[in-house]
């Protein structure tokens, strides 16, 4: 087949991150809630989704996403790669993540952890979400997470299904 931009793992990973943001908006969730789901409960590193994006750099993430969007017109999930309005605003403001000391997360004046409220574009105090399903995943793994019956379980199931289908198709 024809070569496509970015390594396939990069393309699948960026699809997952961009879909995570889309799903967060659709389900009206907070960044810290999503990261509580997308880390160890899903068998992923503690940095989860948004902390990882801050490490990569939001300018880099946006660039890779836009490259796939522009260079892969036949991708059935092409629109997923279009950066959200709030992500574009972050890059515009120069809030690029760890390298600029603020992205999806930042430290407050007293070194406290703050998280971006993507609706207001303001930083608010970080909260450790309390989901029964993410607690169940500690012992029962991903299966316990996705088979549970709360918002976190629904989020995890939708994200995993979408990501696995995208990976299978590419």
Image: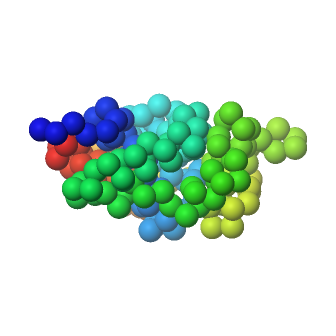
Find the residue positioned furthest to the right: 110
Q: How is the image coloured?
A: rainbow
The structure residue drawn at horizontal position 45% and vertical position 67%, both measured from the top left corner, is 27
User: In the image shown, does 144 or 80 lie closer to the viewer?
Assistant: 80
For the N terminus, which image quadrant? top left
Q: Provide residue 119's location: percent of width, then percent of height.
A: 63, 67
- Is 38 rendered above or below residue 157? above
In the rendered image, which quarter is residue 77 located in? Answer: bottom left
* Side of 148 relative to 3 (left or right): right
The structure residue drawn at horizontal position 59% and vertical position 61%, both measured from the top left corner, is 86
Q: Provide residue 72's location: percent of width, then percent of height.
A: 28, 50
- Is 64 rendered above or below residue 81? above
In the rendered image, which quarter is residue 116 located in? Answer: bottom right
The structure residue drawn at horizontal position 44% and vertical position 68%, both measured from the top left corner, is 26
* Side of 97 relative to 34 (left or right): right
Find the residue positioned furthest to the left: 1
* Side of 3 relative to 144 (left or right): left
For the C terminus, which image quadrant? top left
> Is residue 27 something that shows in the picture?
yes
Q: Provide residue 46's location: percent of width, then percent of height.
A: 52, 33
Q: Provide residue 40's location: percent of width, then percent of height.
A: 45, 36
User: In the image shown, does 9 or 30 lie closer to the viewer?
Assistant: 9
> Is residue 134 something that shows in the picture?
no
The structure residue drawn at horizontal position 16% and vertical position 39%, both measured from the top left corner, is 2
> How many numbered discs?
0
- Is 82 rendered above or below residue 169? below
């Amino acid at each position: 087949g024809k070569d496509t931009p970015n390594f396939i793992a990069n393309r699948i990973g960026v699809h997952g991150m961009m879909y995570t943001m889309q799903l967060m908006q659709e389900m009206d969730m907070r960044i810290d809630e999503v990261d509580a789901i997308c880390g160890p409960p899903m068998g992923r590193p503690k940095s989860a989704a948004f902390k990882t994006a801050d490490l990569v750099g939001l300018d880099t993430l946006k660039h890779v996403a836009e490259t796939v969007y522009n260079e892969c017109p036949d991708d059935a999930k092409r629109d997923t790669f279009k950066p959200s309005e709030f992500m574009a605003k972050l890059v515009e403001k120069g809030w690029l993540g760890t390298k600029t000391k603020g992205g999806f997360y930042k430290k407050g004046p007293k070194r406290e952890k703050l998280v971006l409220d993507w609706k207001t574009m303001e930083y608010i105090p970080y909260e450790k979400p309390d989901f029964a399903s993410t607690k169940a995943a500690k012992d029962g793994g991903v299966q316990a997470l996705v088979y549970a019956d709360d918002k976190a379980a629904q989020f995890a199931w939708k994200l995993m299904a979408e990501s696995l289908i995208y990976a299978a198709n590419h």
